[in-house]
Image (cartoon, rainbow, N blue to C red):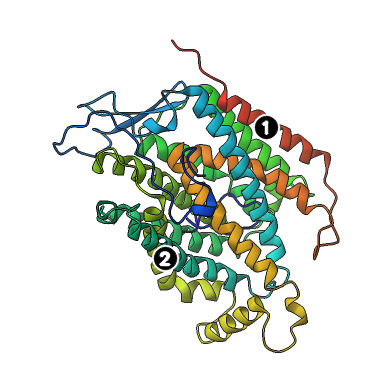
Amino acid sequence: MGSPFTSSLNSISFHFHTHPSFLRPVDAPKFGSVFLMPSPQEKLGHFKESSISFSTRNFRIRSRSGKTRFSSPRNSNSSPHASNGDSDPPAKAKLLVVSSIIIVSLAVANRVLYKLALVPLKQYPFFLAQLTTFGYVIVYFSILYLRHRANIVTDEMISLPKSRLLAVGLLEALGIATGMTAAASLPGPAIPILSQTFLVWQLIFSAILLGRRYSSNEIAGCVTITAGVLVAVGSGSTSNAGQMLSGVAPLWSALMVASSACQAGASIMKEFIFIDAGNRLHGKSLDIFVVNSFGSGFQALFVLLLLPFLSNLKGISLAQLPSYLMHGAACFLNIGAERPDCKGAPLLPLLYVITNLAFNITLLSLVKKFSAVVASLLVMLSVPISIYILSLPLPYLPEGASLSPLFLTGSLLLVLGLVFYYIPQRSK
């Protein structure tokens, strides 16, 4: 599944699939055994067998003292993330630190390798986007099949209602479509700045769909982080956002904000799916590859329906699309005739695809283990790091770039925002 979580968080464009996602739990094997790693059992207290309404009136999630808690009129002590370490705060804090290091490292590698992958594929970015959209469906369902054969994924997990996963796919496809439409008419530097509304939408949707309440320091932290990213991303621009958007119809800015809203809604919906499944499965943890596979499948279906529209946005007619994709595949594999423009392929594109897969799997696991907002905050931390690395002379990108003092200011604001967000609240 794509999480632009695909383009929404990208101040340097990158394609992440769920695409969202989006770290393995502390008691799970590492990536080397991702095909056979067991799904952790998350205890939900003592749920009754009677049917439970999942409306937001009967199911509320409240954030108290930095912990996500689950309550219903029938059982106020139930917790969907009991295995997250709520009963052992030091263990949960340690898990969060380890998770943060892993996800930030993968996010940085993902952004940098995407930029490097576009060196040989500079004429075929649309091909790379479709490869990740449709290719990941095959990868995710293959992993799901192996995990089902190994009895890690149960029939009960597979038979869960798919309506919410269909909604995730639709929202992510709409996010891609509206984002590409807006990007065609917006100045480049304005796109990552407008995309920072992603975090604001996440806070709004988590309050509406999950009933979550945020403390003043958490809200201040999110605002400070967003400001830091805006300053860091805009530090290389000689004009402010208002000047950049002068003469641009408000519709295009609104569409970019709507794209962020769609992606944010999809990320919160994934979190809700994990919480809802915990009750439906009587305390068992929903395997992330069920969400990744079906979410990606529905997203690919909607993208396929929108493909003529999306290709036209890139200046590729429907009649030209098969030829474009064939040439893109040939450049990706760097086979056939001499292709001097495809130097660096297939190594650079393959490194990006492998890293992107690991990033999305890890990110969705982080959404499951903690929350979509926490995952987004950590991914945002990778933005200034990625910009700094890409400013250095790199293989295939030897020119480098200079950074203004505002870049350092934005980076410090971002770190300060994370400190604000994680300041423990005094219990009343």
- Residue 60 vs 280, above or below: the answer is above
- Identify whether 28 is placed above or below 125: above
Q: As displayed, is residue 317 above or below residue 94?
A: below
User: Mark 1 vs mark 2: which is more N-terminal?
Assistant: 2
For this view, does 153 lie left or right of residue 256?
left
Compute the Cα span from label 1 to label 2.
39 Å
Q: Quadrant of the C terminus?
A: top left
Q: Position of residue 124 (x, y in %)?
A: 64, 74
Query: Which residue is disc 2 drawn over?
Result: 142
Q: Residue at x 77, y 53 (%)?
A: 390
Residue 87 lies left or right of residue 339; in this view the side is: left
User: Element at badge 1?
Assistant: helix
Across and down, in percent, residue 259 comes to 50, 54
Q: Which residue is mark 1?
A: 415
Query: Relative to the observer, which residue lies in front, 406 or 218?
Result: 218
Q: Furthest-top residue in view?
A: 428
Corner quadrant of residue 60: top left
Question: Outermost residue, left direction?
Answer: 50
Query: Image check: 330 left or right of 34?
Result: right
Q: Amino acid at mark 1?
A: Val
For mark 2, give the secondary structure: helix
Q: Residue at x 43, y 54 (%)?
A: 36
The picture places residue 101, in percent across and down from the top left corner, at 63, 39
